[in-house]
Amino acid sequence: MNWGIIGENLPLYAEGAKLTLFLAFGALLISFPLAVSLAFVRNSKVRALRYAVTIYTLVFRGTPLLVQLFLIYFGLAQFGLIRTSILWPWLSSPIVCVLIAYVLNTTAYSTEIFAGGLRHIPVGEIEAARAYGLSHWAQARRILIPAMLTRSLPLYGNEMIMVLQATSLASTVTLLEITGVARRITLDYYIQFEPYVTAAAIYLTITLVLVTIFHFVQRRWAGYLDPRSS
């Protein structure tokens, strides 16, 4: 065993963990308002809008994230119009491409999660809001969105963890997040076991922290939905 090498490279793992958290939570922060908005469109009575969102979520949930990442990072460079545009300095950056891929992917999943939560709101709550004469915006802000989010917490918590694990794919486009650091140590020192065990331990630690936070949030704001609490 060569754990001394791992000890020497702990600062590199720390930098990789920072990048992992930046990619995961950056994508989630951008996608959250998009998914909340698209959830309402997903349940819209306007058929064209509803179908457009359905097609978007189907495409990004029905294809591998790795393929989406490669299409954005490698595929866009094939178009001369993009390479000569003002967007190219951004689109040539691996961090930007990874964030775009993650945002598009997690927005698709989160939209379906929130749309399902919206559909499961009891009709009585909506009718009560209408009886009070609340505007559509007031109904959404005070009744629909809070109820939708509390009902979606368990599934959205799982989605957050999936996004965290998906950051490991960023190493395929040269980024040194946690998995990228483990791969680099493997190539530099010709050891296989210790770098990836360390990476797995870091992912597990972050995941346990997220699970603990979500359990607290769920008990605090969505405990009334748990039949065991009645």
Image (cartoon, rainbow, N blue to C red):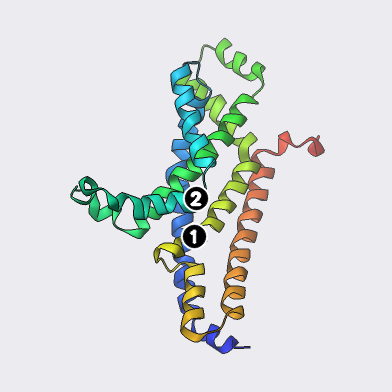
- Residue marked by disc 1: 169
Q: Is residue 23 above or below residue 38?
A: below
Front residue (pair 70, 34)? 70
> What residue is rendered at 45% in x and 26% in y?
52
The amino acid sitting under disc 2 is Leu
Q: Which percent across, then down, holds residue 35? A: 48, 36
**The disc labelled 1 sits on which kind of residue?**
Leu
- Whether 151 is drawn above or below 89: the answer is above
**x and y percentages locating residue 109 in the rendered image:** 54, 40
Left/right placement of residue 103 relative to residue 224 reads left
Number of residues whose C-alpha sits closer than 10 Å to that of mark 2, classed few (under 14), some (14–19) or many (20 or more): some
Horizontally, residue 84 falls left or right of residue 30, namely left
Name the spot of residue 12 as percent of width and height, x first: 45, 76
Element under label 1? helix
Q: In this orientation, which residue lies closer to the viewer: 210 or 155?
A: 155
* Residue furthest to the front: 78
Q: Where 121 falls versus 71 (above or below)?
A: above
Element under label 2? helix
Q: Residue 165 vs residue 230: left or right?
A: left
Q: Quadrant of the C terminus?
A: top right
Residue 80: assigned label: none
**Is the Cβ of the residue at disc 1 closer than 8 Å to that at disc 2?**
yes
Task: Please report the residue visible at 59 percent of the width from the left and 53 percent of the height from the top.
Answer: 161
Horizontal and vertical percent position of residue 187: 48, 80
Mark-to-mark CA distance, 1 and 2: 8 Å
Residue shown at 58%/79% (left/top)?
Answer: 192
Q: Residues within 10 Å of mark 1 (few under 14, many from 20)?
A: some
What residue lies at 26% left-to-right and 48% top-to-bottom? Answer: 79
Q: Which residue is mark 2?
A: 65
